């Protein structure tokens, strides 16, 4: 349930209302907007008399939220969430470019790609240290060393870093990471999500291979229920009957998520299509559809990449894409800058 307060409500009356709700064991979230203040209520609100609240002087409107996701719901938080990491903002009018290799392979590799990503307008460096591979015989990642190398690349380039966690036991290694990624395969690892809810670090939550949009939002809700509101939703392609691409990029999730949630939405065209030459058009389409950013696999030597070389674009191609995006984004009211609000 959400209670929309009138402009400049009497603070004592607001406190009285909050205390009364708290006595019924209802959690209250106060969201102060430019025009009005919204009280988001979580808990068993079945005993709350809507008409009684609506009749209060300070109340403009009361709405029940039918959807099972509350904190992730736009009714709960009408304005876009903007996540700030230093000089980088994600959400709102900002368009964020995350790019880098599928996996951190070596010091030389990650530093070289990081320099290229920074020089070509990227904001955040991606790179897997813990890799969820279909085959146990495939490269599993450099693990702790991979994270150290990402940190070194950040120091040199100023890029923020995002990397995937696969298990709660790894959490301590992520203390100095800017954004923790939850991969598609772990989207419904609820114990992991609950643990990340205790952190205040931004979480990039990827949609599961066979998950619905509502299931993605329910996973975001798990993190937010623990108090961590810094969730970025990521569409990375879903399993369908189509085999021409690795997965099917569900770009229609962008308007759906933007309507139903206030959280930033980022698109991963690389894992969606699985083919480097399709990444450019899908990236432009994602920007045109209203997404808040992209996470793209970029490799300096795709033919010899230890993971996902076929879908990795070169630094030059990334530069070309970034420059085309900077022409396109103003059309949809977004900018690729670092310090927009
Ligand atoms: C990745 O981003 O490296 C990755 C493994 O992606 P996904 O979880 O979407 O498959
Ligand atoms: Mn990959």
Image (cartoon, helix red, strand yellow):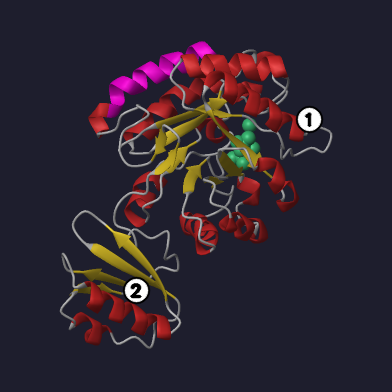
Prevalent SS, magenta region = helix
Secondary structure of the residue carrying tag 2 is: loop
Kindly give the residue lying farthest to the right in the view shown. 137
Query: Could you say where residue 199 lies in the image, as x and y percent from the top left?
Result: 58, 53
Disc 2 crowd, CA 10 A, few/some/many (<14, 14-19, 20+): many
Identify the residue shown where x is 43% and y is 78%: 26
Quick check: 67 above or below 45? Answer: above
Is residue 229 part of the magenta span, yes or no? no
**Where's ligand 1: which quadrant?**
top right
Query: Could you say where residue 301 lies in the image, as x and y percent from the top left?
Result: 65, 13
Judge whether residue 141 can be spotted in this image. Answer: no
Disc 1 crowd, CA 10 A, few/some/many (<14, 14-19, 20+): some
C-alpha separation, residue under disc 2 versus residue under disc 1? 48 Å
Q: Which residues are magenta?
A: 314-329
Query: Could you say where residue 9 lies in the image, as x and y percent from the top left?
Result: 18, 70
Quick check: 298 above or below 128? Answer: above
User: Looking at the rendered structure, which numbered label has been put on residue 139?
Assistant: 1
């Amino acid at each position: 349930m959400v209670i929309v307060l009138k402009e400049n409500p009497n603070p004592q009356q607001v406190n009285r209302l909050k205390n009364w709700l708290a006595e019924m064991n209802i959690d209250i979230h106060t969201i102060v907007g430019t025009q009005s203040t919204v009280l988001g209520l979580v808990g068993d609100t079945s005993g709350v008399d809507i008409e009684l609240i609506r009749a209060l002087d300070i109340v403009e409107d009361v709405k029940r939220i039918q959807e099972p996701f509350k904190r992730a719901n736009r009714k709960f938080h009408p304005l876009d969430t903007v996540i700030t990491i230093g000089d980088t903002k994600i959400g709102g009018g900002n368009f964020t470019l995350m790019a880098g290799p599928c996996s951190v392979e070596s010091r030389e590799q990650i530093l070289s790609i990081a320099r290229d990503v920074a020089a070509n307008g990227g904001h955040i460096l991606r790179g897997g240290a813990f890799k969820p591979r279909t085959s146990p015989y495939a490269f599993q990642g450099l693990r702790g060393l991979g994270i150290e190398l990402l940190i070194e690349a950040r120091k040199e380039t100023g890029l923020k870093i995002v990397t995937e966690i696969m298990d709660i036991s790894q959490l301590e290694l992520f203390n100095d990471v800017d954004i923790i990624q939850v991969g598609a395969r772990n989207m419904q690892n609820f114990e992991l999500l609950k643990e990340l809810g205790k952190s205040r670090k931004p979480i990039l939550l990827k949609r599961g291979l066979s998950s619905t949009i509502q299931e993605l939002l329910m996973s975001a809700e798990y993190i937010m229920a623990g108090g961590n509101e810094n969730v970025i939703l990521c569409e990375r392609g879903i399993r369908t009957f189509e085999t021409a691409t690795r997965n099917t990029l569900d770009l229609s999730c962008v308007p759906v998520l933007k309507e139903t949630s206030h959280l930033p939405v980022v698109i991963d065209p690389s894992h969606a299509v699985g083919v480097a030459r399709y990444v450019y058009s899908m990236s432009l389409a994602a920007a045109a559809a209203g997404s808040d950013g992209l996470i793209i696999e970029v490799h300096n030597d795709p033919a010899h990449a230890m993971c996902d070389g076929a879908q990795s674009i070169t630094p030059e191609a990334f530069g070309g894409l970034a420059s085309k995006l900077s022409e396109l984004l103003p059309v949809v009211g977004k900018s690729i800058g670092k310090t927009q609000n």
